[in-house]
Image: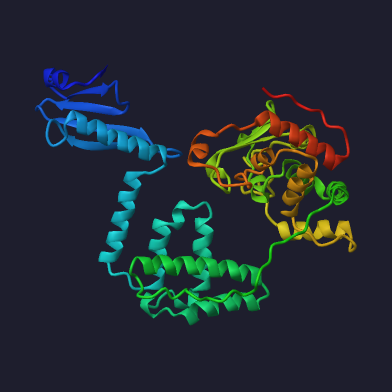
Amino acid sequence: MKHEFTDRYLSSLKAPDEGRLEVSDTRRAGLRFRLTAHGNATWVYEKRIKGGVKRKHTLGRWPTPISLARARKIALELEVEAAQGIDRVALLKAKRIEDAAKLASLSTVQQVINTYNDLHLSHLRTGIERKRVIERALTKHLGKSIADLTRKDIQEAIDAKAMEGHKVYANRIRGMLLALTNWAWQRDYIDNPVGAGLAKAIRETARERILGISEIRIIWNATYNMGELWGPFLRVLMLTGQRRGEIAQLRWDQVDLVNRQIVKSGAETKNGKPHTTHLSQPALANLEGLTQSASKFVFSTTGKTPVSGFSPMKRKLDKILGDNFEPWHLHDIRTSFATALANAGEPEAVVDRILNHSASGSAPSAVARVYNQAEQLPQRARVLDKWAEIVTGKMAKIVRIG
């Protein structure tokens, strides 16, 4: 039952003979008034968190301590928080976990890592892998007191990986361990930020490899010697300009062959933003040419997990390309995609949306971040069709959307 709440109206409500009476406010969506058979009157507010679950909050009793005006004010605060993705229930749960951890007097490195995982890593898309990397790096120290962990211990873990020849990956480990120790220090698990001042295994510089159009077409032609799995994978990757992992983990339920789109939710993309990718005619043809087996993944060697083995695949592709082809990485395709289309006069904002980037020109205003949600799907479709023409060297069939 719905009704505009007033103090007079609420006072006129009679307690039911059994169970409870529940009425929703027409002025503040989600705010409900409950009256039990015993005459107890309470406020309840329910709202879905942006990108998350629906949460129910018990606000308190009416008329004291929570009046109608006070209930509407609290409901508005909760509505604003929900729109910003703030989940009070989850925050309270995290606080309880943290308090319990402190009461338990955490002592070992492993215990701190476990709590770090519960409060932080478990909410990240790559959290499981990060926890595994941290534990492997600190495997010799997991049983020792966190208070005894030194900067030397952490640096040795980084240097050990670098000595194996994986210097760039050693830098990634450094970043993970630095984040862990800073987190532990901020929560008083350790007295000092022992990760401060950790040396990098190698100084990295921004890569400037931009594949030319002729090189793009050489790679495109080479994919036809990469077999029935890797060939289509590489061609879809090249034609869509998406990240390697997002195509590798592509599922059939994300592919709309009728409307010629790949549609992913925010939870399925690197930057957490939902994303739609137009399929040009060659991209569509490559997906339509695949056999849809029982696997939910478009590209899979096992039928149960996404395709893997990128290093052997890349070595085979490089062998096909020959020794005279300058070294390159798969990610260079995205850089070349952006560069070629910019040189062709395509709007930067449209190219950025295809790549699922934020605009690179300047930081958007607060108003723009909230209201400028135009997806520009027709423009993105035209640009991707044009890119297909550039890659394949064949005239693309331009699709009009909207």
| In this rendering, position of residue 143 left or right of residue 353 | left
| In this rendering, position of residue 328 left or right of residue 268 | right
Whether 31 is drawn above or below 305: the answer is above
In the rendering, at what x and y percent does residue 216 appear?
A: 83, 49
Whether 176 is drawn above or below 158: the answer is above
For the question of whether residue 17 can be seen, the reply is no
Of 307 and 267, the residue lying toward us = 267
In the rendering, at what x and y percent does residue 230 appear?
A: 77, 49
Of 72 and 112, the residue lying toward us = 72
Which residue reaches farthest left? 38
Of 293 and 371, the residue lying toward us = 371
In the rendering, at what x and y percent does residue 198 appear?
A: 52, 76
Which residue reaches farthest bottom? 152
Instruction: Name the residue: 77% across, 42% down.
Output: 341
Colouring style: rainbow
Residue 385 is drawn in which quadrant? Answer: top right
Instruction: Name the residue: 70% across, 31% down.
Output: 379
Whether 349 is drawn above or below 208: the answer is above
In the rendering, at what x and y percent does residue 93 appear?
A: 31, 51
Residue 273 is drawn in which quadrant? Answer: top right
Instruction: Name the residue: 49% across, 37% down.
Output: 367
Whether 230 is drawn above or below 398: the answer is below
| In this rendering, position of residue 10 left or right of residue 233 | left
What is the total number of numbered labels drawn onto the structure image? 0
For the question of whether residue 83 can be seen, the reply is yes
Instruction: Name the residue: 16% across, 26% down.
Output: 35
